[in-house]
Amino acid sequence: MGPPSRETWAQRLGAFRASPSAFMAGPEGEDLGRDLLIELRSEKLSEQTKVSLLALSLEYPAQLWPDAAAAEAAATSLLDTLVLLPPRPSALRRPLLLAATTVLAAGDALGPTSGASRRLLPLLLGLASGRDLGRGFGPASEQRPLQATACECLRELESCKPGLLGDCLGLLRRLLGQEGPVQPLSLLLALALRNALVIRAKAKAGLQGLLVAGDAPTPGGPWNWALAEEGGAHPQPQAPSWPAAEDEECGLAVLEPSPEEARELRAAVAQLLDSSYLLTPVAQAQLLWLLGWALRGLRGQPPVLFKPQLVRLLGTAQLALLHAVLALKAAFGEALFTAQDEALLLRRLTLAAQHPALPLPAHLFYLHCLLSFPENCPLGPAGEEAAPLLLGPRLGRSLLPSLLHDPMALLARLHLLCLLCAEDEEEEKGQGWSPQRYLGELLAGLRQRADLDGGPRALAALCFQASYLVVRCLATQPLVLTPLTHGLAELYRARPALAPHFVDLLDRVGPELGEPLRAVLRQEVVSRAGRDEALRWHLKILAKVADGNAPSATLGFLRAAAAHCTDWGLQQALLRVCRTLMRAGVREGLADLLQALARQLDDPDGRDHARLYYILLAHLAGPKLGVALGPSLAAPALTSSLVAENQGFAAVLMVQEAPAPIRLSVGPRRAAGPGPVLQLQVEVLEPVFSLELRFRVQGQLYAPLDAVHVPCLRPGRPCSPLLLPLQPRLPAPTQLSVRALYATPAGLTCHAHLPPVPVNFEDLFLPFPQAPDDGDKQGFFEELWDSCLPKGAESRLWCPLGPQGLEALVSRHLEPFVVVAQPPTSYHVAIRLPPDSRLLLRLEAAQAGGVPVALRTDHWAVLPLAGDYLRGLSATG
């Protein structure tokens, strides 16, 4: 078999990207990595195709070469392919370098024992240095892009193995002073410097001349892994997240460089800062953060080195640079930022957050900076949320939230308003404007929008998010929480459908709001009538807030509501409230209610649960009852003889969905009685007890159907047909949705959905009462025939007979409805269709191929159904 074509590779790559894990588990997955490496040397594939193959190795190296040995072999093959490239310009050199670096790093194969590492590291350092490494590395036009790529690869390896380039700091400093790619070299030197300082500080050792330029390792020669082995394989953070723990700062303080080393370190930092303006804003931000972390807490290194950069950056419009400035302020505080700098920065953030043309992400960024503003001299304990001291009432009022703001911006501004409320002094409360008063008006407006009937769900969610934020920030201020509690109670009174939001809020808030809100919601629910149309929402709330306080009112509400819990869902919600009361220790009156529910509920599952709860309540003490009703399946075994001692107890209390072990089919048609009746044949694959079949008809064509009950069914034992009376409101066919509820031999209650049962047009046929004697039958039919017009409809059609003939067809399908018969050529048929329609047929002058049929009915919609039925008789035989 020849090598795969370009189309074949496209198909394989598409299948792999669709599901990498499934593809690698298949028959083609094992050889994908090997085939990829082979095809990179093939001359039949274009460079563009090879670049797409290398992109795959960059995205999924761990899937293609999952262990260190495979990653080592793959990196070696990629380096061999790189060396074998012709000296002409090629688009493969840079992707090959990136792929070899990625494979070694992702496969955890980078180390002193790796042959590929010993080849790759000197090669990358040589390319970063701009040295001529021979004809295999392209013309001079590719050297500068290759130099930048090599720096990126070295930075990636240094990130994965901190200290890897600790012996090359002097060389990197010298390269930065030469003509070369400034940004990749600057970021590489800053990262290597930061890692070297952290590792030396942990080892309590000096810099030992690391910043002095030395000779670069030669290809194939030894690489100094000492500093990398001291640092371990724990990558340092690469994003501005300043360590909050004091041990990190103290660790750097342990490092005491000599005067010469301190001078070299300052020179290296100044060299990086002086060239930082040539970098992109994102690269500048990362450089400032790396250098700030490198010098934070380091003795003999004043942060004044950053001062010239602050003069340039305090007025920047780049968000990344502004973030870096705030990170420096968090690191050095008043040692670098004066009070005037802090006031200027805070005022600038405040004014920028008010810009009307600001996009939402930038708006949120400025607000986040204000909420997390690093002050020079913060009041209160470390880590406590507080508004900046210099953000006075005048500046704060310009950032007040409004109902017109975007939801995310409103929540951020509300957070700031809550912090201002927390610091509101007593003497300010007598003034005309008060943050607490404004906060109350805003929350009232949010509740008013959430109260809109049929309003967007997002408005309700925003109201409860704002309420949670207020509680989290102002949990100790009753002047705010009391009106909030009453406002939420009024919101529930106006719109009980928000019950899920109330339950979620109660799960998240602390007792400061949770306890009073539970009390007012409980009082609000129990004061309602049990027949309230929002009963299911009241039961949902009551299951959350019911406790041992005032149980008589709760039980009274449940007794009134029980008569209106007519479906399974409402009955289960009612029982959940009873379960909550049992866990709260309520006994008086609850046992009587459970006994009544066990007799009163329509659903057998609800009655079983009520009976079980009554038995548990009557026979188990408080601790054992709590264990029995607990949510965990790993609860300790119960010692009561009334409850099975196993971890599946919770499953017994639930109706579980299961595959249906029941087969349901329609039996022969019964053309007798006052109404149509379906005969259902039931077969089971396993024993089934207390089977209840529930039928549901879509739309309003039929009246609701009663459930059918079977006490016991066993495989192989015939069951008498089940009779299902139908009550059609129009003579039309339909389908019945079927749901089975049953008990298994293991004692579990299960439910399953069965295939729908069809109700055909002919299943509705009923005969007319026969005439008194044979002489009146023709007159009886003619009377029916004439009564259909003029309000009814008439039609004629041709009914194919097939080989059986008219007499056999009528005998098989229409025998119960024949009024007048003159076999074998003429029949008069009268069919009664519920609720009060009729269908009359004249089948006369039968011929060899069929018979003409005249139809009359008093309901015009029956004609197309009757036509379809008659035309299909010959096909059914």
Image (cartoon, rainbow, N blue to C red):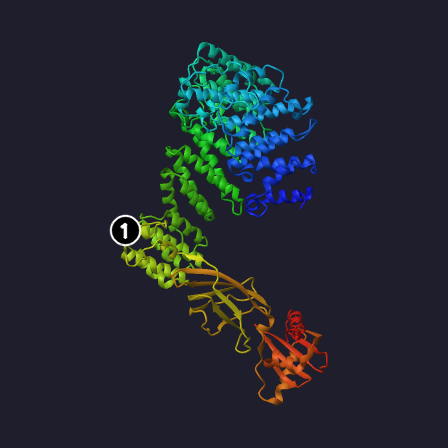
Residue closest to the far top: 259
Secondary element at image label 1: helix
> x, y (%) of residue 738?
51, 63
Crowding around mark 1 (Cα neighbors within 10 Å: few <14, some 14 to 19, many 20+) is: some
Name the image quarter holding the C terminus: bottom right
Q: Tell me: 345 left or right of 847.
A: left
> x, y (%) of residue 556?
34, 55
Asked if residue 225 can be seen in this view, the reply is: yes
> x, y (%) of residue 326?
50, 22
Q: Tell me: 279 left or right of 799.
A: left
- Up the image or down, 630 lies above or below 323; here it is below
Identify the residue shown where x is 33% and y is 61%: 595
* Mark 1: amino acid: Gly
**Residue 765 image-quadrant placement:** bottom right
- Up the image or down, 399 lies above or below 771; here it is above
Quick one: 564 or 692, which is closer to the camera? 692
Quick one: 353 or 628, which is closer to the camera? 628
> x, y (%) of residue 208?
46, 15
Identify the residue shown where x is 43% and y is 60%: 750
Quick one: 188 or 525, which is closer to the camera? 188
Asked if residue 279 can be seen in this view, the reply is: no
- Up the image or down, 466 lies above or below 246; here it is below
Q: Tell me: 18 left or right of 532.
A: right
Q: Which residue is mark 1?
A: 622
